[in-house]
Image (spheres, helix red, strand yellow):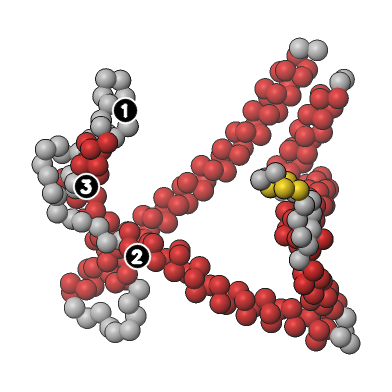
Amino acid sequence: MDYLLIKATIGVIATVGLYSILYRENKFYRTFEHIFLGLASGWALKTAYTDVIGPLWLDKMLGAEKVVGGTAGQMGYWPYIFLLPLGLMAYFVFSKKHNWLSRIPIGIILGLYSGQQIQIWWNRFGQQISDSIKPVIPTTFDSITKPGTIPFGDYHPTPDQIAKINANVYPTQALTNIIFVVTLLSVLAYFLFSFKMDNKITQRVTMTGRWLLMIGFGAIFGSTVMMRFTLLIDRMYFIWIEWFKTGLLHK
């Protein structure tokens, strides 16, 4: 056995051990679960230093040498040293006598986090709000569907043609936008609990929103299942093709 085959064999054993949970809870699965968690913890610690502590704190504080525009060196930002005791205070959570010290960095982090969430919320949901305002009336009937803007074969649209295509709303786009707007309003109406829905029209709208939510959840669940099957297929390909056929049958 060469090194690559030994490495692949260990990977196969680990894969079978983790998938053995599908049969029932067993010690074989527990063993590889603990190995995986240990490796993941070590990798997380290493990544925390190489991606966060090192470049964002230590290098900036000490002035790591870099070459930028032909000039070597970078001045250190010494006030970053005050972040060290704040960070170490968080570990006092394990002390019964001085655990109150751990609340200081937690309070600072929560304060900064709360302030940032206002901007983060708008950057995330503000764009979704603006994107929900869609035109529902076609502006042109030159084509039922939107023409392509990517060159293909003998079709090479000019920049002016692409701008004209993107500026118009075609019938199929308008139909799609109508479905989107109806879905959005129906789902939002389903979550209006401030007043009682006695009107038959509002009741039907909320019921439509409920059904559309179920369809959306079903699609999400289906895509989640397919993603799990994708991971399973990848592992089975690793076992039967990369390891079994290539590693054993050709030796």
Camera-nearest label, 2 or 3: 3
Sequence-wise first label, 1 or 3: 1
- Name the kind of residue labelled 1 in the image: Pro
Q: What secondary structure is found at the residue carrying circle 3?
A: helix
Count of numbered circles on the image:
3
Quarter of the rendering occupied by the C terminus: top right
- Which of the 4 image quadrants contains residue 100? bottom right
Q: Distance between the residues labelled 2 and 3?
A: 20 Å
Q: Can residue 211 be seen in this view?
A: no
Q: Name the residue under label 3.
A: 167
Quadrant containing the N terminus is top right
Residue at the extreme top:
250
Q: How far apart are marks 1 and 3 (CA)?
A: 18 Å
Q: Which kind of residue does numbered mark 3 sit on?
A: Ala
- Kindly identify which residue carries mark 2: 129
The amino acid beneath tag 2 is Ile
At which x and y percent is residue 220?
45, 52
Residue 55: % across, % down: 74, 55
Left or right: 116 in relation to 206: right
Is the C-beta separation of discs 1 and 3 under 8 Å?
no
What residue sits right under mark 1 in the picture? Answer: 151
* Residue 99: percent from left, percent from top: 83, 84
Q: Nearer the viewer, residue 129 or 15?
A: 129
**Which of the 4 image quadrants contains residue 213?**
bottom left
**Residue at image coords 78%, 29%:** 8
